[in-house]
Amino acid sequence: MINFWLPFLLHNSGQYIAISCFHSLISSNIKMEHSNKNSDDCEKIEKISKVEELEELGFPSDFIIKVEEFSFPVHRVIIAAASNYFRLILSSQMKESKDGCVDMEEVDPHAIKKCIAFMYHSEMPIALTEIEDVIHASKLINLDRLAEKCFYQLNQELSPDTCIVSLKLAKLYNRNQYELQNYILKNFRAIVASDMFPYIDHDDLVDYIEFFSAGEDTERIKWEAITKWVKFQSDRKDNFPSLFQLMNLDLLSPQFLQESVRTDPLVNDSVDCMNIMMESLLPHTKLRQNIMNNTATTPKNIHIACLNLREGSIDAFNVRSKGWCRISGSPITGQYKFGSICSCLYILGYNGDFFIFDNKRETWIRKPSGSPHYEHFFVIEFQGKLFVLVKHHTLCYDPIQEMWEAERLPGCRLRFFCAASSEDFIYSVGGAIGTFCQWDQARRYDPLRKRWAKIASMNKERNGSAAAYACEKLYVLGGEWDKKYLSTVECYNPDTNTWTSITNMCVTRDDPTTCVSDDKIYVVGGARDEDGNPEQDNSIELYDVISGKWAIISKGRIYPGLVQSCIYPKDRLSSGNSVESGGCKTQ
């Protein structure tokens, strides 16, 4: 009776019902032949599913699966019903079907044995150490139910020791990784301490290092993660400098930098890493204190230094007394940029001439010239250095070394933009890009990766605006669009990568400049009246980021479109004092 039905089952092996039919026939035949046995024996026989037991009952294996030196006898009908891989082989005129044997490569024999057992049992305990090989084997032979069982087991038994393997498998087989990624981020410290951490992929390590917010404790974890991963394999040493740059060493204590970072062979073997580490130590040395002597004490007064291009003079507005005084004349003529670095004023001409104002001697000192500029550029202080932003490149001046760095960094790809900086990034906003002149674009420069990246576009296009960074947000103010001058302000949140509109300025402004101090944004110049004509009144207004309110704090003196400004923390300047224009010395 059984032999009569076997051809039918083999012919219809594509249907999963074949397995249940086959087992039903076995059970019914066994019950008929063993009707004289007790019920316990019958129950034991009904659970028979091993190949050897089926052969003992008169159902010999008729196919062999070979893996390396191992051979596994199986029944065609069972493996064909359970696996699309074997169904294709056995239902065609393939050589393996005729020979009654398939030789499998690049698969673990013990994993195939587990797959065979699952096709017979439908349930099979799998140790965590076996799961990776079993998933690979089950995917190879299209045994999807077993693969799903393995992934489910991994999720149920997730731990710092297993999550790295789980993530690798999820990526390899295009599984949802959301819960896994959240688990790793929440348990990163424990995962770094686990033995499996060095098996994490390089790109994943970079993502996790960049994700965590800055802090001394966080930076120590990053240091441990990077050094542990690199030292695990000798061929990873070349990755260390780029990973090292992802850290914010300034947040680590001088003791940790000296005892742990500076003494590590990975740092000592890299000139770039040693330079980065020494730059972080400088704030704790006398050298930096001597260079930064102008900011050794917190000034009682804050001044807004304004360069009036029409008069060629630099005046200072005392924020406390609301009075003005003359600082100096300009050492050069023509077009130039003006600002402050390390509490010293600077002037950079389009022709490359570069001067820094000596606060003690009240005179301009010539510094090494930069490259001449024949297009719009923006100068900004960032992380103690001066960055000159141009469309196609970025230049950097180091005031400690008193030299322009030889390397030309990439440009922001925008024209006629404004810019601002946070502690970690430089932002360029609102410039034209491409043939279609999109004026709502925004870019962010990462000094560690030395590259610009696009961020969310502003809600509205604008030209001739100003930017400021305060209280962890970027503000873009005023400008002009569609022949209308603007008083509108947009605020960018880096955490959500979104822009929102906030309270308008008191007046419309075109080509104003901004400076920031104590959570307050000062907008200088560029005022326009209702008809769009230049207006000398309402020259400076203040935005209190905490209260969200605008206020006019100075009228007159400032000409629209002809002013640049910066914060100048000099204590001794006061209203009514006239500081004579200093001479110009060359150094």
Image (cartoon, grey):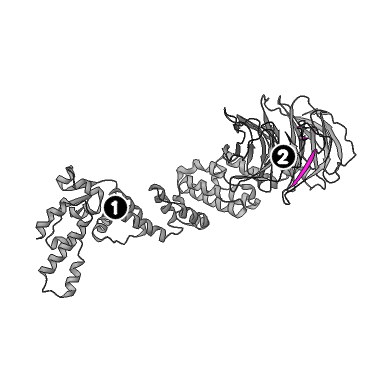
The image shows a total of numbered marks equal to: 2
Which label belongs to residue 487?
Answer: 2
Visible residue check, residue 402: no
| Label 2 neighbour load within 10 Å: few <14, some 14-19, many 20+ | many
Q: Would you place residue 222 above or below residue 540 in this image?
A: below
Q: Which mark is residue 143?
A: 1
464 left or right of 33? Answer: right
Secondary structure, mark 2, is loop
SS majority, magenta: loop
Residue 446: percent from left, percent from top? 59, 40
Where does the image place residue 231, in percent across and percent down from the top left?
A: 48, 48
Picture residue at 60% right of the left edge, 42% below the top: 274
Three-letter amino acid code at disc 1?
Leu
| Coordinates of residue 321 in the picture (x, y in percent) | 86, 45
In this view, 153 is above or below 443: below
Q: Is 37 in front, or is 3?
A: 3
Query: Residue 242 shows which numbered tag?
Result: none
Q: Is residue 88 above or below residue 415?
A: below
Residue at 59% over, 51% down: 213
Mark before the other along the chain sequence, 1 or 2 = 1
Q: Residue 35: image x %, image y %?
A: 11, 72
Give residue 541's quadrant in the image: top right
Which image quarter is the C terminus in?
top right
Above or below 296: residue 437: above
Q: Within the image, what quadrant is residue 417 found in?
A: top right
The residue range painted magenta reads: 528-544
Question: Does the magenta segment cover residue 203?
Answer: no
Q: Is residue 300 left or right of residue 195?
A: right
The amino acid type of the residue labelled 2 equals: Ser
Quadrant of the snapshot with the N terminus = bottom left
Q: Is residue 109 visible?
A: yes
Classed neighbour count for the residue bearing mark 1: other residues with Cα under 10 Å, few (<14), some (14–19), many (≥20) = many
